[in-house]
Image (spheres, grey):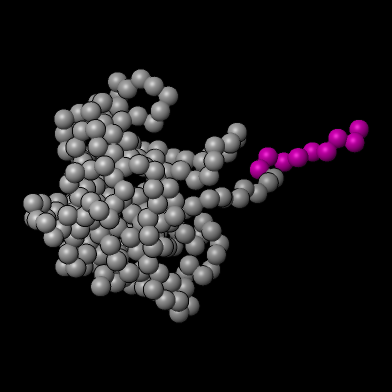
Amino acid sequence: DGKIIMKDGDYKFYYWGPYLYHTKVPSEIGTEMLRRGELLKNRKDTDYREMLAGDIRHEYVFSKEDRKYFTMNTMPLFNDYMRGLNDWSHVSKFLDTRVLKVFDLWINFMQPNEYNPPHTHDGDLSFVYFPKVPKELSEEGDVYKGTGCGPGKIEFSYGEKQNMVVTGHAFLPETNDLFIFPSSLKHFVYPYKSNVERVSISGNINFEDYKSKPLPISMNYD
């Protein structure tokens, strides 16, 4: 009868857009980074607000020693990101990246009604890590009514909204969540009303050199 029989699964799927990675950081690293972050408060030389996009009162830059601690203890996660990026994109040059340099690292002590507007970062890669997320934010989200993403969420946005096109992902972070993404990926953080403090740590990374050697990568914090 001339009918063409098509098999289920007889197609290819092409990934599109940025590679957004979501994982967990061990809690002991979060405890230590929170301790180091608390030491930065009330110091004029660590105030980082003029360098950042957010409407957040308490934002502080970490020292070189703090960057060293964070870098050395999270290196396996960034190795994992680079492996995943290569598998997902099939662009071999990412495997050639030998050194990732963490050149910027800061901490945000976020209070009610504070927020980060839509923005991008410097460098090649960026990350946002949440070592402290109070349970009240989840409870506030449960009773939220509206068509928006909801209070306290972080949203990543790529391209303009279109029918049948995924242009964004939004998450209500949990304690020790880590997101790694290209620095050019637009993202923003919605305000919340609960009378609690949420802490996030952000940073930027540059690809330092290319030597066509297999993973793992190494990391630099100078």
Q: Is residue 79 visible?
A: no
Q: How many marks?
A: 0
Residue at 30 percent of width and 27 percent of height: 141
Return the x and y of residue 157 as percentages of the image width and height: 46, 43
With respect to residue 164, does 215 lie above or below? below
Horizontal relation, residue 40 to residue 177: left or right: left
Q: Position of residue 73 (x, y in %)?
A: 23, 63
The residue positioned 83% from the left and 38% from the top of the image is 4
Question: Could you tell me which quadrant the C terminus lies in?
Answer: bottom left
Q: Which residues are magenta?
A: 1-9
Asked if residue 28 is positioned above or below residue 220 in the image, the reply reads: above
Residue 8 horizontal side relative to residue 108, left or right:
right
Judge whether 79 appears above or below 127 on screen.
Answer: below
Is 4 magenta? The answer is yes
Q: Position of residue 77 (x, y in %)?
A: 33, 59
For this rendering, which residue is in front, 88 or 159? 159
Q: Is residue 116 among what the camera can see?
A: yes
Residue 172 point in image, percent of width and height: 32, 36
171 part of magenta stretch: no
Q: Quadrant of residue 154?
A: top left
Q: Residue at x 22, y 62 (%)?
A: 70
Snapshot quadrant of residue 101: bottom left
Q: Is residue 75 above or below residue 170?
A: below
Q: Residue at x 44, y 55 (%)?
A: 184
User: In the shown orientation, is residue 26 left or right of residue 153?
Assistant: left
Q: Main secondary structure of the magenta part?
A: loop
Furthest-right residue in this view: 1
Residue closest to the eye, 171 or 73: 171
Residue with the most extreme front position: 50
